[in-house]
Image (cartoon, rainbow, N blue to C red):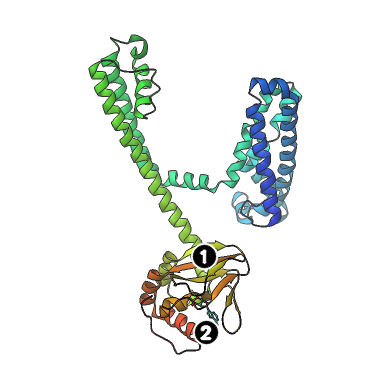
Amino acid sequence: MFDPTSAGPAARAVRLVEKIAVFVGIGDYTLGTVPEVARDYDPVMTAVAVLISVLFSFEWIVRLWLAPLDVPAFVIKDVVPHREAENSAALARLLWLCSLFGVIDLLAWLPIPAALAWGFPAATVRLLGVVWVLKLVRYTPALGLLARVIRMERQPLLGVALVFFVALVCAGTLAFIAEHGRQPATFGSIPAAIWWAVTTLTTTGYGDAVPVTATGRLLGGAVMICGIGLFGLWAGILASGFSQELRRSEFLRTWDLVAQMPLFHSLGAAIIADVTRLLRAQAVGRGRVVVRRGQPGDSMFFIADGEVEVFADPAPVTLGPGSFFGEMALISGEPRSATVVTTRASTLLRLDVADFRELMARSPELMRVIQNESARRTGRAVSPLSPPA
Ligand code: CMP
């Protein structure tokens, strides 16, 4: 129920309530700093903040209680190998309390009532609500992804940061030399000139410090161009790291799905890796038409999870996990022979026609299995692969 990845209705309801509470809380403490709003609604805003704290305190207690379900036994064994099993629940709770989310969840409720009880002004206490936004981290997998990308790409990122620093110091020093005689107030020291270099190199340009000498302006132009290049480099490193990491996690997810399908069990590890690279996992809701009779075929599907109904002649056929469909149009080049609809929320692995042909050429064993099953479905003899229409 409190698992952020669970798709159950109770877990979804908990997530929704938590997110609504966080957004209401953020609205409460930010609007509370608007003087007119604070003047008219101060008690209401404080009451909302306390209410949200009470809600989060309840959540904290439940999460603490359920912590033994979350912290795996091997983690506990790693921390205290000599402890007996009966102590593991208490240890799991202690580990959760010290974890990042344990600390965030505690800070999300305790400080507000504590500070109010201590007698701090309500308007100041409400600012402690800034912690609420951190609760969204639990539901933001992209942040974990970003952290992994930064960890993996730290060398090139640090390299660019170093170039940035060198450019900053050089530009600041040169700007000081060029400008401090004409503008002692804004370029009177190297740190002040470095402030100009920061705003110029990052292409922010507040306009509070502007070079007026010809040398200063030339320098300004060079620094701006340098800044664009350096930020392009940063963005490039992060973007390629992101796409590599996404591909890697997609590969691992698809690998898990492919590995558990009996159809692929007999294939060697190299072919399974090939298949994994070519397949695209897609979640399809219940009652969706995946393939429509009469349309040209551009891909086939393996069912990793769920169920589909094939509206075949003379009677509909139900296909479940491990089965596949959409292969006939790819083999014969004819339009789709039947409409296929999901009867449950399903995870399908899609194989595009070009990849299908490549894979069939590389794995005659898989080709035989698919062709035999297709021939059994049509009641015809096995037909060789022909180009698609
Ligand atoms: P295709 O013709 O590309 O698109 C519809 C799919 O339904 C078809 O490929 C098969 O994969 C599947 N199909 C058609 N007839 C049957 C059947 N009798 N039994 C199981 N699957 C079928």
Circle count? 2
Residue nearest the observer in this picture, 240 or 280: 280
The C terminus - image quarter: bottom left
Residue 1 in view here: no
Disc number for residue 256: 1
- On whether ligand 1 comes within 8 Å of the CB at mark 2, the answer is yes
Local secondary structure at mark 2: helix
Q: Please rate how many residues cluster around mark 2, counting C-alpha atoms within 10 Å: few if below 14, some from 14 to 19, many from 20.
A: few
Residue 292: x, y in percent? Answer: 52, 71
- The residue identified by callout 2 is 377
Quadrant in which residue 330 is drawn: bottom left
Residue nearest the observer in this picture, 42 or 174: 42
Q: State the residue at coordinates (36%, 35%).
A: 161
* Amino acid carrying mark 2 in the image: Arg
Local secondary structure at mark 1: helix
User: In the displayed image of the protein, which residue is found farthest to the front?
Assistant: 294
* Amino acid carrying mark 1 in the image: Asp
Residue 214: x, y in percent? Answer: 23, 17
- On whether ligand 1 comes within 8 Å of the CB at mark 1, the answer is no
Drawn side of residue 21 relative to residue 264, left or right: right
